[in-house]
Each structure stands twice: as structure tokens, then as C-alpha cells.
Image: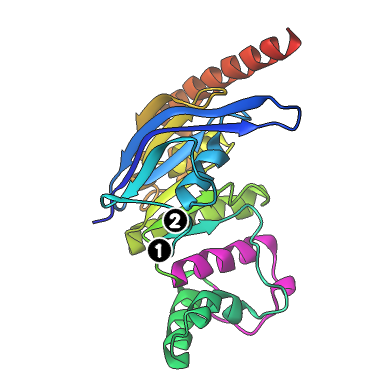
Amino acid sequence: MSELVVNNVSMIFDTPDGGTVEALRDLSFNLKQGELLSILGPSGCGKSTLLNIIAGFLAPTAGTVHMDSRELHGPGADRGMVFQQGALFEWLSVAENIGFGLTMQGRPKHEIRQTVNHLLETVGLRDFGNKAVYELSGGMQQRVALARCLANDPDIILMDEPLGALDALTREKMQGLVLKLWKETGKTIILITHSVEEALFLGEKLFVMAPRPGRIHKEYSLPFAEAGLTQDPREIRASTAFVEKREEILSMIWEMEEQIMGTAEV
């Protein structure tokens, strides 16, 4: 069981003019294996900074990140990242992109082929393995990015606005795929989004972060992700419980944004 422990993490950046920006302050939480956490908040509240610290791309100014009592220093194969843009290699085929990490590890070709074929089936791209990346739509490219992440079998999947660039219909389909992969793989997933509806629908847990310095303003435990595995997503979004939570969080974030604007005007 891989438990993620974020303990009193703070992050301060130096600015070119000699000043500093406090992006995160004393942020702590635990995630058990298989939990799905969505994080949202006003712009500049440190969401991406937090994800990059967990991924190992940034070292926090203070505090620690542990997995199974092991302190994390730098990137590792136990954490996979999916970005807003797929960050795929356009000179490689779909299958080669998915198997890239395994190839770099020197895995046997038959093992790579077996894993890639399984993942192509899993993400609904069975007949596209030999296609070039540029031949795919944005939604299909994100499916490839998800499959490439899963090929390395990370304990935690970190997703930074992975569906933000997609059209509404494709985004809704991809949300369903995220839930499907979450349930089938048992992976821990942390997803950052600016969409309140997406955070509510995908987050088994949801953190609303406060404006800079980033802190957890409010935490929710939600039933909608589990329900989304078996129920019509549009019926879930139209339900009284969903609408009430959406309006509550929208009002919360709107107030934060107004505070930020008020501070900026001063």
C-alpha cells in the first residue's frame, strides 16, 4: 500500500527584482493508495507548484513529501505525470510513444509489445498503434499520454489540467475514461483543474485552495466519482446534491478572486 504524506510543505520563489513570492505555506495532507483527489482554487494559489513538488520537479523550501515512509527527492518512476498538452514525441508512432519508458528501461520487446497492446485496448485506441501522433485529435492524444503514463506502472498519477484544452464533448468522454482507469488500475490520482464541475465529478476527495500563499481552505469527501462509474454523468450533474455543492464552491472561489482583485488594486 503506497501512502502519500505531504507534511508542512512551504514554497517561496525568488523574483528577478530581488523580492520573494510565497506560493505555498504549511500544507499537509495524506492520501491512501487508490484515492482520487481533485484540487481547485483561484489562479495563483499554488496548485501546479504543489503537483510539481510531489512529482519531484521542485524541492520545497520547507516540509517533506513521503511515500511509504520514504522521503522523496527528485522525480521517480513511482510517480507519473500527465500534462495539459500530451508532451508526446511527434516523430514516434502511438505505440512507440506508449512504450517509450519501457524501451528506455531496456525491457524485452515482447513484453513492451504486450503492455502496449493492452493499454491501446484500455484507452480505446486499439486500431491506432501505428498512427503518427499528429494524425490524432486532441482527445486521442491525451489518451496516448494516459497510456504512456500507465505503461510505467506508477503508484501515483499526477494530472495537471489534463483535459483543459479539449472541447466540451471530448472532455466529458475523457472524464469517464479517467474514472474507468482509476477503478480498473487502483492507482492514486491527483488531478488539478480550473473547472468546478470537473473537480466535483472526478474528485473522491476535493481540496479548495486559498489564494497565495496556497493552503487548503476547505476539504470535501464526495460520492460523485464512485457514482460516475455506473450512472449517467449528466444525471449526476443535474442532481440536487451536485448542483448545491457546485454553487457553494463557485461562490467560495468567486469571493477569493474578488479578494485577490481588491488586493491587486491597492
Residue under label 1: 154
What residue sits 51% from the left and 27% below the top? Answer: 214
Give SS at disc 1.
loop
Give SS at disc 2.
strand
- Residue 144 lies in the magenta stretch: yes
The amino acid marked with disc number 1 is: Pro
What residue sits 47% from the left and 79% below the top? Answer: 105
Instruction: Check contact, mark 1 vs mark 2: CB within 8 A.
Output: yes
Main secondary structure type of the part rendered in magenta? helix
Residue 86 locus on image (x, y percent)? 63, 61
Residue under label 2: 157
Q: Tell me which corner region of the image, top left, top right, bottom left or bottom right, holds residue 255.
A: top right
Residue 51 locus on image (x, y percent)? 50, 45
Please give left or right for residue 131 compared with residue 117 in the image.
right
Number of numbered discs overlaid on the protein picture: 2
Of residues 248 and 159, the one drawn nearer to the viewer in this rendering: 159
Determine if residue 5 is in view. Answer: yes
The amino acid marked with disc number 2 is: Ile
What residue sits 65% from the left and 32% below the top? Answer: 14
Q: Specify start and end residues of the magenta stretch as a single range.
A: 125-151
Of residues 163 and 189, the one drawn nearer to the viewer in this rendering: 189
Q: Quadrant of the N terminus?
A: bottom left
Q: Quadrant of the C terminus?
A: top right
Q: Is residue 7 above or below residue 163?
A: above
